[in-house]
Amino acid sequence: MNKKHWLVYALVTTLFWGVWGALISLPEKNGFPATLIYVVWSLTMIIPALFALKNINWKLETDKKSILYGAIIGFLGAGGQLILFTGAIMEGPAYLIFPIISLSPVVTILLSVIFLKEKASARGWIGIILALLAIPFLSYQDPEGKFFGYLWLVYALLVFLAWGLQAYFMRFANKTMKAESIFFYMMITGLLLSPIAIWMTDFSKVINWGYDGPYLAFAIQILNSVGALTIVYAFRYGKAIIVSPLTNAVAPVITVVISLFLYQVFPHYIILVGMALAVISMFVLAFEEDS
């Protein structure tokens, strides 16, 4: 593999996740609950999973170690997403939740440096630091309303830890198993958690089953699923300490830009600072020689 292929996969992830982030709330605004959006997301994972398996001639790794790593990665990712939509956002202030969650690359970087012995050049570290600085700026939201209690903080920290660990294990597992097998198990674990989301759905309320409900959700969530596949490839060919902050910093820039045109909302100056930091970090990391 060309050493720059990791960057192609990482940029596809940031593009798809950026667009996904700008559109994700549309189905819920149209009356399709977040719990069922999770179910739709889990179904969209099947499509790229089949593509991935076909890419390796359906030779799925089924040894105990591969199943274990795949299950860990899958449950960390899908579990984090389920907690986010059914716990954190329902309990607490989004303007505090998302900055906490978006710092998950810190967990990934620390674990990768300590246990995987990953290293970057001075320029690479500059890019990493700029990306990490950009994330909380990009996650800024104006405070709305009052929230009481600390349960939301527990949920937010669980998602923060889950996604940081997932990225680390994704890179770790890529050393011994195929990226395609990893993604297959991610798809399976996502589906396994769907009954929980269905159980948590309040079917006594009116649910929009029209084209702008589940069908729109499917079209939006497929962006997330394809991005999830390409980030597995990015972790296979690139360093976790580079890929993780890059994707977490640049995707929100795309989300903000699309939201600007879509919702006619000009971003806060704090977000503009984050956008500038993220763009600079993207160019610095793109030319990291040690990747």
Image: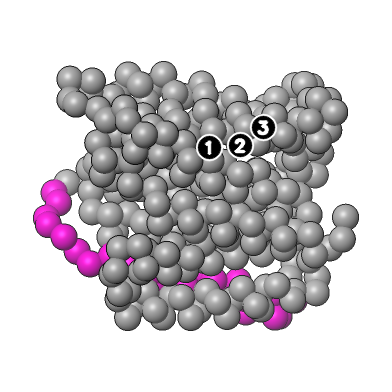
**Residue wearing tag 2:** 73
Q: Is 262 situated left or right of 176 in this image?
A: left
Asked which secondary structure carries label 2, the reply is helix
Residue 261's x, y, as percent?
Answer: 37, 68
Residue 76: assigned label: 1
Q: Is 214 situated left or right of 248 in this image?
A: left
Report the span colored magenta. 121-148
Tell me, yes or no, whether the two marked residues, 2 and 1, touch with CB atoms within 8 Å: yes
Q: Amino acid at mark 1?
A: Leu
Residue 35 visible in the picture: no
- What residue is at 49 percent from the left and 58 percent from the top? 18
Tell me, yes or no, whether the two marked residues, 2 and 3, touch with CB atoms within 8 Å: no
Q: Of residues 53 and 73, which is closer to you in this image?
A: 53
Disc 3 or 1, which lies upstream in sequence? 3
Q: Quadrant of residue 57?
A: top right
Q: Give the distance between the C-alpha atoms of the residues marked 2 and 1, in whole angstroms.
A: 5 Å
Q: Give the distance between the C-alpha atoms of the residues marked 2 and 3, in whole angstroms.
A: 15 Å
Q: Give the distance between the C-alpha atoms of the residues marked 3 and 1, in whole angstroms.
A: 18 Å
Quadrant of the image containing the N terminus: bottom right
